[in-house]
Image (spheres, rainbow, N blue to C red):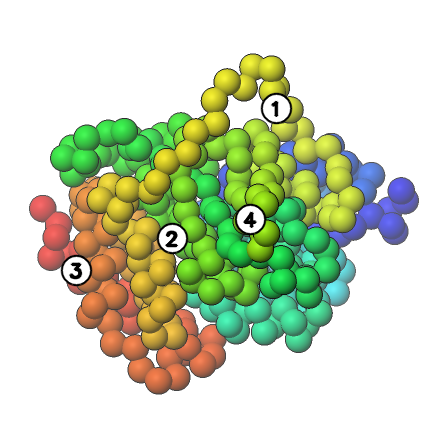
Amino acid sequence: MNDAARQRICILGSTGSVGVSTLDVLSRHTERYEVVALTAYTRIDELFAQCVQWRPRFAAVCDAAQAQDLRLRLHDARIATEVLVGAAALCELAAHADVQIVMAAIVGAAGLAPCLAAARAGKRLLLANKEALVVGGELFMRAVREGGATLLPIDSEHSAIFQCLPEDRSTWHSRIDHVVLTASGGPFRTRDTATLASVTPDEACAHPNWVMGRKISVDSATMMNKALEVIEARWLFDLAPEQIRVVIHPQSIVHSMVVCRDHSVLAQLGTPDMRVPIAFGLSFPERIASGAAQLDFETLSTLSFEPADLVRYPGLQLAWDTLRGASGSTTVLNAANEEAVAAFLAGSIRFDQIHSVNAAMLESVRIEAGDAASVDALMALDARTRRRALERVKQLAP
């Protein structure tokens, strides 16, 4: 494939775990893909190294001092990458005319605006940022439809569901009875719940199956990641809340299941490696090598399932509560959780207090009519929730 025929990609959040895995997959298929833009938040050393390797036309960082530092280093290395700065730069790159594929791997609500920009520009959007749908589900899906974007989920669970369904989306409703999202249960699935108050950040980030960033690792330990995935599934597949269920599957081999109207079950299996859904999203409807290990069924001894314990994982129920609540409730939940997890990682609150902050915000933050009517309104609600959450964190701090 010549240079003109290669697919051109922008990676939003290239230094995070999903971004790094994406570059690993791309390194196996340089004849098919060209990296046009890379972005990072704080990991400038890693971004510089990526620019040295991939020579993108653009790089973007969050503040002017970081941008100047990166420019000087790239100049000294004689690399002609143009460095952009700020949130607006992310939107500019996501919608850039020379970009065909956008990998949305930014963690948190900060990913909503560039995801919307990519959707409105009609890109192939590989969505690893679940918060874009949690915060702005209806607005986001409308932008996808109106922009003519191709939306491909990268979370392993949603990619699994997508892979179990036909390409013709118009048939989905007539086929699906419900979907089952699987969850590993995280590092504390069998730990005495009486000891969870003493969990350290390092313990919470030690996931038994997946290699992930610290924030999402904590979310996996609390099962808030699964709560957010329930909300994401509602919008991705246009499901009612009661059509989405969660089951614990400690081996992380079955990534999710679709239960059909006739009660047959379709499941997608694979090793717990994010390169599999990334490769699928990059090449859909084709398939390319991901670099992940194959399942060895001759040595695969056990696939077990168990119910999700809402005493151990009280935050999981908040998914269905917020989906049935006022429009904007999911925005409140996400903002509260981001601040609570950051506070836990900083040592300001205990592990078990993450849920108490989230629940308190859902009770105390008043949602007005129109709070979910636009991106600006959602961001104002997000900011209002964060201020309240930080006040709550201060009250809980030892």
User: Mark 3 — residue?
Assistant: 392
Residue 229: give x, y in percent of width and height.
45, 52
10 Å crowding of disc 3: few (<14), some (14-19), many (20+): some
Check disc 3 and report its element: helix, strand or loop: helix
Residue type beneath disc 4: His
Packing grade of label 4 (10 A; few <14, some 14-19, many >=20) is few
> Which residue is label 1 attached to?
295
Q: Which residue is mark 4?
A: 263
Q: Nearer the viewer, mark 3 or mark 2?
A: 2
For marks 4 and 3, give the CA distance: 46 Å
Mark 3 or mark 1: which is in front? 1
Q: For the view shown, which residue lies furthest in the right direction?
A: 2
Foreground disc of the pair 1, 4 = 4
Q: Amino acid at mark 3?
A: Arg
Residue at 52% in and 73% down: 139
Q: Position of residue 84 (x, y in %)?
A: 59, 59
Q: Which residue is mark 2?
A: 227
Q: CA distance from mark 4 to mark 2?
A: 25 Å
Mark 1 Cα-neighbour bin, 10 Å: few <14, some 14–19, many ≥20: few
Q: Quadrant of residue 276?
A: top right
The first of marks 3 and 2 along the sequence is 2
- The one nearer the camera, 210 or 22, is 210
The amino acid on which the numbered mark 1 sits, given as a three-letter code, is Leu
Q: Secondary structure at mark 2?
A: helix
